[in-house]
Image (cartoon, rainbow, N blue to C red):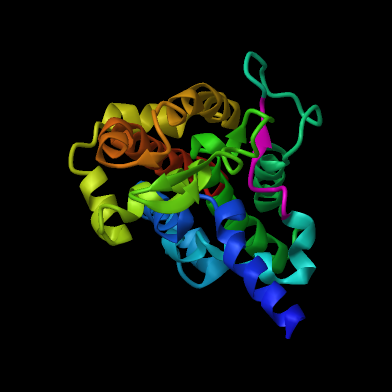
Amino acid sequence: MKYLIRIIFILAMAPQNLFGWGSTGHRIVGKVAETYLTKNAKMKIKKLMGHHDLSRMSIWADEIKSDPQWKHASDWHWCTIPDGEDYETGKHKGQAVEKVNEFIKTLKRKNTTIEKKQVALKFLVHLVGDLHQPLHVGNGTDRGGNSVRLKWFGESTNLHSVWDTKLIQHQNLSYTEYANYLLLDEDRGNIREWQGDSILVYVHESRDLRVQCYEFSGDNLKWDFFYIHKGLLEQRLLQGGARLSGALNRIFK
């Protein structure tokens, strides 16, 4: 019985420590990206996956975290860049950048099995979203805000969880409603520019933007925090979708 209680406790705590953007956030990124896929990309993704609904495949990489066979992938969802530094492969913890580049190569390689390409695509859709959440590019001191304990409207949580899920859930929108809302004032010029960006562009953006995530006073975050940070939240969700579409359009020409 004690063992069972321990397992239940671990599973209950896991989402706060591990999941990026939360299911709704990842689906928003996938839905936005789907909007900007070319016909060729949609056709080739459908041939590979049986469909081209990116929102559907966007949360698979979080769902498999409970599978012991994927334990080795626990550090694929984030990277670390200390303040004042640029990203360097292998210098700090977290493999998200390397894995994004690896999965892009896997999808482009002609002699790769369908199964490996399917896994690569599902991870790529997820990780591009993760790296647009500023706290998934951690400073190396507080586990991406997981160690910053606080309250959200009186509920005990941590700063990472606020950015992963609380800010999005607070608006009580489905992922399709939220994606459509983000696209209302689209600037096609910005979309095209973001689609051409490399991974280091948005990783370094997250490094710089994460400073804003820590801008609050007191330990009980409420409406003022939501009001101040809503713009940054929505900017990153939209950019994540646009850049994901750009990467996929290049892969599936």
Asked which quadrant contains residue 71, the reply is bottom right
Residue positioned 49% across, 41% down in the render: 159
Q: Position of residue 235 (x, y in %)?
A: 35, 34
Total numbered labels: 0
Q: Residue at x 45, y 66 (%)?
A: 56
Decide which of 139, 94 is in the foreground and name it: 139
- Magenta: predominant secondary structure element? loop
- Is 243 placed above or below 126 here? above
Q: Residue furthest bottom?
A: 1
Front residue (pair 10, 110): 10
User: In this rendering, would 90 be left or right of 144?
Assistant: right
Residue at 36 percent across and 38 percent down: it is: 233
Q: Is residue 241 visible?
A: yes
- The residue segment tinted magenta is 74-81
142 left or right of 16 in image:
right
Q: Residue at x 67, y 70 (%)?
A: 66
| Left or right, 248 with reference to 116 | left
Residue 32 in sight here: no
Q: Position of residue 122 (x, y in %)?
A: 58, 59
Q: Quadrant of the N terminus?
A: bottom right
Please tell me whether residue 79 belongs to the stretch shown in magenta.
yes
- Where residue 63 sits in the image (x, y, percent)? 59, 67
